[in-house]
């Protein structure tokens, strides 16, 4: 895999306040993407309970739909939570704390989104095929999600750190620059020798 150059905080030349502002803006952009998907999923789940084709004779469908609705609602609250926290802490000088609160809310929201998607998938597949097929697919989806959302990013982070450490070790092992005009193969001239190599004596 190609080695990717790591970014450095020193290269950005940011103050702690500027870094907190940049981190918060990046988190807000991520939350906008996730929140759109949650809103669509939540609206879809709300409409399922009012459809005529929704199974009414199986209590399991009611339980799964309720759990999916609660998961998607919780995810939406987590993604909108930083807005409320930012309003309450507006101009209070707590941007660094706000960044960490937003980070943990976004992480919790992603977990709830995964649960809501898995439960919604179970509902649709169980209604179209069977409960056994839906259960099998619902067990596979969390594994795929963990591979894409946790294992792969963690592996890439570990690989980049090892590559960066290897590059730093190579830089440390490289010899320093040789002074100009110094020939390692040349023999030192005898003391008192002139430009022509003869010894300059007085008699």
Image: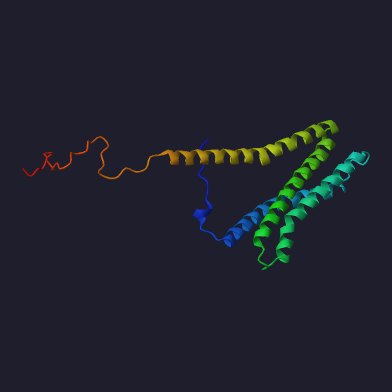
Residue 83, relative to residue 71: is it above or below? below
Quadrant hosting residue 116: top right
Q: Residue at the spot x=72%, y=61% of the render? A: 83
Q: Is residue 78 left or right of residue 19?
A: right
Q: Residue furthest front?
A: 203
Q: Is residue 92 left or right of residue 8?
A: right
Looking at the picture, how far across and down is residue 68, in whole percent? 82, 45
Quadrant hosting residue 95: bottom right
Q: How many marks?
A: 0
Looking at the picture, how far across and down is residue 57, in whole percent? 94, 39
Q: Residue at the spot x=81%, y=31% of the render? A: 133
Q: Residue furthest bottom?
A: 91
Q: Residue at the spot x=85%, y=33% of the render? A: 131
* Quadrant of the snapshot with the C terminus: top left
Q: Is residue 183 visible?
A: yes
Q: Is residue 86 left or right of residue 74?
A: left
Looking at the picture, how far across and down is residue 73, in whole percent? 80, 52
Residue 182, relative to residue 105: is it above or below? above
Foreground residue, 11 or 172? 172
Looking at the picture, how far across and down is residue 98, in whole percent? 68, 59
Colour scheme in the image? Answer: rainbow
Q: Residue furthest right?
A: 57
Q: Is residue 144 left or right of residue 131?
A: left
Q: Is residue 53 visible?
A: no
Foreground residue, 165 or 118? 165
């Amino acid at each position: 895999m190609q080695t990717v150059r790591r970014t450095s905080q020193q290269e950005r030349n940011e103050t702690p306040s500027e870094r907190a502002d940049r981190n918060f803006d990046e988190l807000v952009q991520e939350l906008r993407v996730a929140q759109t998907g949650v809103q669509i999923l939540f609206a879809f789940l709300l409409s399922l309970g009012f459809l005529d084709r929704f199974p009414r004779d199986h209590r399991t469908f009611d339980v799964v739909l309720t759990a999916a609705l609660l998961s998607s609602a919780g995810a939406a609250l987590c993604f909108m939570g930083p807005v409320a926290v930012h309003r309450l802490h507006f101009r209070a000088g707590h941007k660094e704390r706000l960044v960490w609160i937003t980070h943990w809310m976004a992480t919790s929201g992603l977990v709830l989104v995964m649960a809501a998607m898995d439960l919604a998938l179970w509902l649709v597949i169980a209604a179209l095929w069977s409960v056994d097929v839906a259960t099998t697919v619902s067990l596979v989806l969390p594994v795929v999600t963990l591979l894409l959302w946790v294992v792969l990013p963690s592996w890439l982070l570990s690989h980049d750190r090892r590559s960066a450490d290897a590059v730093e070790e190579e830089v440390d092992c490289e010899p320093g620059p040789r002074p100009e005009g110094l020939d390692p193969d040349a023999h030192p001239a005898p003391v008192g020798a002139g430009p022509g190599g003869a010894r300059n004596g007085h008699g």
